[in-house]
Amino acid sequence: MTDYELRVIKGCPNTVPALNLFRIALEAAGLPVTRLRVRVLTSDREAQELGFQGSPSFIAAGDDLFPAVAIPAVSCRVYPSAGKMAGLPALASLVAAVRGSGQEA
């Protein structure tokens, strides 16, 4: 079974909305929400080791569902959503990314 992880930094204002969005996306894709955990990153070293692209990051089997080219750091992240940049991806984009990750329940 695949593990899913929401990676965030302490104090990220999008942590709770991102967690709710990830749960909804997993359910929509027919995948187990019980395999979802939250990981709070606290250091640049940890961010570099994980290739952390900012908070929040949506992970399936260790891979970022929205790969980006950025210097790993303890920082915020934005996503294109409805023609603008936002702190969360659109639900449809996250569902498509989860389904496209090739992961099965």
Image (cartoon, rainbow, N blue to C red):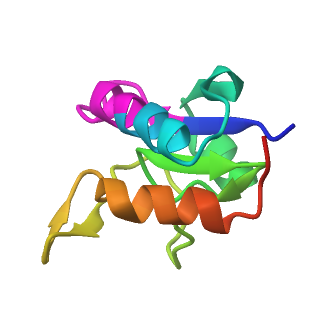
Q: In the image, is residue 59 above or below residue 93?
A: above
Image quadrant in which the C terminus is located: top right
Q: In the image, is residue 6 above or below residue 86?
A: above
Q: How many marks?
A: 0
Measured as percent of width and height from the top left, residue 100 is found at: 64, 68
Measured as percent of width and height from the top left, residue 23 is found at: 47, 32
**Which residue lies at the image location 29% right of the left edge and 51% below the top edge?**
88
**Which residue lies at the image location 36% right of the left edge and 38% below the top edge?**
21
Measured as percent of width and height from the top left, residue 32 is found at: 67, 30
Residue 9 in the magenta stretch? The answer is yes
Q: 6 and 50: which one is in front? A: 6
Q: 87 and 51: which one is in front? A: 87
Q: 75 and 81: which one is in front? A: 81
The boundaries of the magenta stretch are 7-20
**Which residue lies at the image location 63% right of the left edge and 36% below the top edge?**
5
Would you say residue 65 is visible in this rendering?
Answer: no
**Which residue lies at the image location 54% right of the left edge and 64% below the top edge?**
97
Residue 52 sits in which quadrant? bottom right
Image quadrant in which the N terminus is located: top right
Residue 5 in the magenta stretch? The answer is no
Judged left or right of residue 36, residue 103 is: right
Would you say residue 51 is visible in this rendering?
Answer: yes
Judged left or right of residue 54, residue 45 is: right
